Image: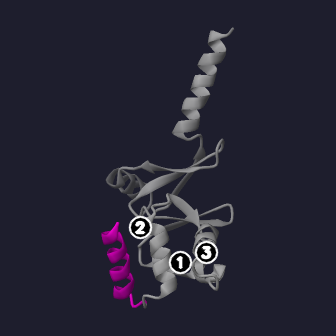
Amino acid sequence: MISMAKDYVSMLKDAGYKITPQRLAVIEYLKKGPGHFTANDVYKEIRKSIPTITLATVYNILKAFADVRCINSFDVDGTTWFENEVELHANLMCKVCGNIVDIKIDKEKLIKLLGENADADFENITLFVRGVCPSCKARQEEDMRSLQVHQ
């Protein structure tokens, strides 16, 4: 994880950002490896060590990190979510538990498919899906098997 922090620092410096205590605190949060998080999640954690930090500051830091591709961001129902994963993938929001799960995607196949249907150059692709995550699906299937056994 130390190299991750160094990568963030070098990416920010290369983009012209100064490395402030607030930005370092966000990097420390990211090193913990949360999958998907909001600015409010980060704010609640960081204000324990930097009580004067504001939610707006945290949001602006995360936005800057996303702008230089240190992290990824996507919007769902008016909420901006952030994640460490910057490679192309889909985000599945589970309608049962509310968790967001990453789904691997074949980048070349997707770009080919999109290219066949749109005469465009793609800069960024964000895929968001609603459904049932693998954990909840497995629980539902187990519940169904259990019901069938007891009938």
Q: Residue at x 41, y 73 (%)?
A: 69
Q: Residue at x 39, y 50 (%)?
A: 105
**Foreground residue among 118 and 140:** 140
Q: Secondary structure at mark 2?
A: loop
| Magenta segment | 1-17
Few, some or many residues within 10 Å of mark 3 (<14, 14–19, 20+): few
* Residue 13: image location, x then y, percent: 36, 87
**Which residue, given by chain and number where applicable, does mark 2 sit on?**
122
Is residue 3 one of those drawn in magenta?
Answer: yes
**Foreground residue among 87 and 141:** 141
Q: In this picture, is 82 found above or below 57?
A: above
Say what amino acid the circle numbered 1 marks.
Answer: Lys
* Separation (CA) of disc 1 from disc 3: 21 Å
Q: Secondary structure at mark 3?
A: loop
Few, some or many residues within 10 Å of mark 2 (<14, 14–19, 20+): few
The circle on residue 63 is: 1
Choose mark 2 or mark 1, whichever is in front.
1
Residue 66: tell me if it is visible: no
Say what amino acid the circle numbered 2 marks.
Answer: Phe
